[in-house]
Amino acid sequence: MGNFNKSNAPSGSGFQIAEADFHNAIIGGLVDFGEVETEFDGIKKMQHKIAFLYYLETEIPDRDGERYVMTTNYTFSFHAMSTMNKHLTAGFGSDFVNNIDDLEDAILGKQVRVLVDHQQKRDGSGSYAKIDSLRPAKKGTDVSMDGFALPKWIVEANEKGEVDAIVIHGQ
């Protein structure tokens, strides 16, 4: 069981967030955190949590060709109101989502366009980038996995035993 918390880069760390815009990406990985305790309005419950790893085509400025890796954490649910289902339906269509037998096989390596949005941190110390929605990839899009590396917070969570499984496209 993981705690599903990730640390944000501290203010002034030099970390650059992706520009708020559409970006070509490949769904390069899937992280399964298993059953995680969550709390909402004072009510605690166990939920199956996963994360998709989106490897953007966009290079990080002044980082010698290094590209952004963004994660979106989801409750594993195909319910029509779930964020995971909404993102998959927007990116690939309801027929795709309704016929998924194996999530890993269905999404890994898929080309997509992600809409990155910026949100203010709760403590007011700056902003962070998040994936607001998915769209179908434009024809001819071919984002590669060259240079892909797991985000540090996932490596650390795995080392602490907070991750049930990590699956990377092509590995």
Image: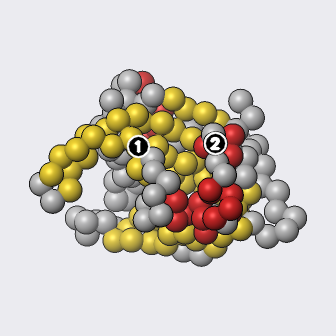
Tag shown at residue 92: none
In this view, the residue in front, 168 or 12, is: 168
Tag shown at residue 49: 1
Query: What residue is pinned by disc 2?
Result: 101
In this view, the residue in front, 110 or 131, is: 110
**Mark 2 or 1, closer to the camera:** 2
In this view, the residue in front, 53 or 82, is: 82
**Could you classify mark 1 by the number of other residues whose Cα lies within 10 Å: few (under 14), some (14-19), or many (20 or more)?**
many
Give the left or right position of residue 26, taking residue 44 as reference. Answer: right
Residue 164 picture location, percent across and down:
45, 28
Give the left or right position of residue 94, taking residue 153 as reference. Answer: right
The amino acid on which the numbered mark 2 sits, given as a three-letter code, is Asp
The residue tagged with tag 2: helix, strand or loop? Answer: loop
Quarter occupied by the C terminus: top right
Quarter occupied by the N terminus: top left
- The residue that appears at 68% across and 58% down in the rendered structure is 96
Marks counted in the figure total 2
The amino acid on which the numbered mark 1 sits, given as a three-letter code, is Lys
Vertical placement of 157 versus 73: above or below?
above
The image's colour scheme reads secondary structure
- The residue that appears at 38% across and 24% down in the rendered structure is 161
Residue 162 picture location, percent across and down:
37, 30
Residue 134 picture location, percent across and down:
60, 66
The residue tagged with tag 1: helix, strand or loop? Answer: strand
- The residue that appears at 55% across and 32% down in the rendered structure is 166
Q: CA distance from mark 2 to mark 1?
A: 18 Å
